[in-house]
Amino acid sequence: MSTLLEKHIVELLQERNDKAISLLYEHYGDTLYGVAHKVVRDEEMAQDVVQESFVKIWKKADSYDASKAKLFTWLFRITRNTAIDKLRSVNTKNDKEIQIDVSDVYNLGVHSLRPDLMDVRENLDKIESKYQIVLDALFFQGMTQQEASDELDIPLGTIKSRLKIGLRELKKLYGTSMALIIVICSTF
């Protein structure tokens, strides 16, 4: 994009001229959609992100400073941050829904799947301590993976790996009777 066109768009934005949004969309819309889609990995959500980004761009037009960043860099950052916020919002909502679903499962009387009615806790000492700590935090202390990561000062990716390996080790101890429990637990 030419520097003159970029300056023209910025001037229109700062004057609150509606034509600025049209020009932004025409020249940057597809690229910003690509940025959003790369983060959220969902077409509909990416479209929402672009729309929300354009609203933010319009509202923050006065804050754009050409001496600090090119117009595209500024647009990119707003879109990327909006996409990240949207993804976090959706993940938080999904986490809450999962927790409600889990509570409903136990309330339906599936007592055979409750860890406190099994001897899993007693058999944790048969696997390596690094897996014991993670399984104990997640299943017996009720922490989320992120909470366990923060509390134990272990990276989130390591928590996930240790959970997977720890469940695999328990499966070896329990055989096929543990398979259903592992499938259910691994969805968390």
Image (cartoon, rainbow, N blue to C red):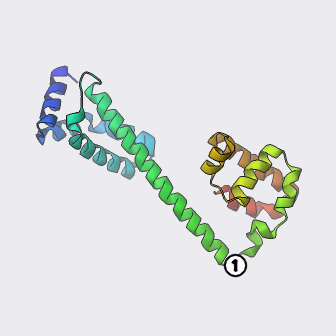
104 left or right of 181?
left
* 141, 7: nearer the viewer: 141
Tell me which residue sits at (25%, 46%) in the image: 55
Residue 167 screen position, x and y as percent: 76, 53
Residue 23 screen position, x and y as percent: 17, 36
6 left or right of 91?
left
Tell me which residue sits at (82%, 45%) in the image: 129
Quadrant of the rendered image containing residue 99:
bottom right
Label 1 sits on residue: 109
| Kind of element beneath mark 1 | loop
Say which amino acid is labelled 1.
Answer: Gly
Tell me which residue sits at (76%, 65%) in the image: 115
Quadrant of the rendered image containing residue 1:
top left
Quadrant in which the C terminus appears: bottom right
Rendered position, 13 above or below 181: above
Residue 79 screen position, x and y as percent: 34, 39
Name the residue at the bottom extreme: 109
How many numbered dots are placed on residues in this image?
Answer: 1
Rendered position, 93 above or below 117: above
Label 1: few (<14), some (14–19) or many (≥20) C-alpha neighbours in 10 Å: few
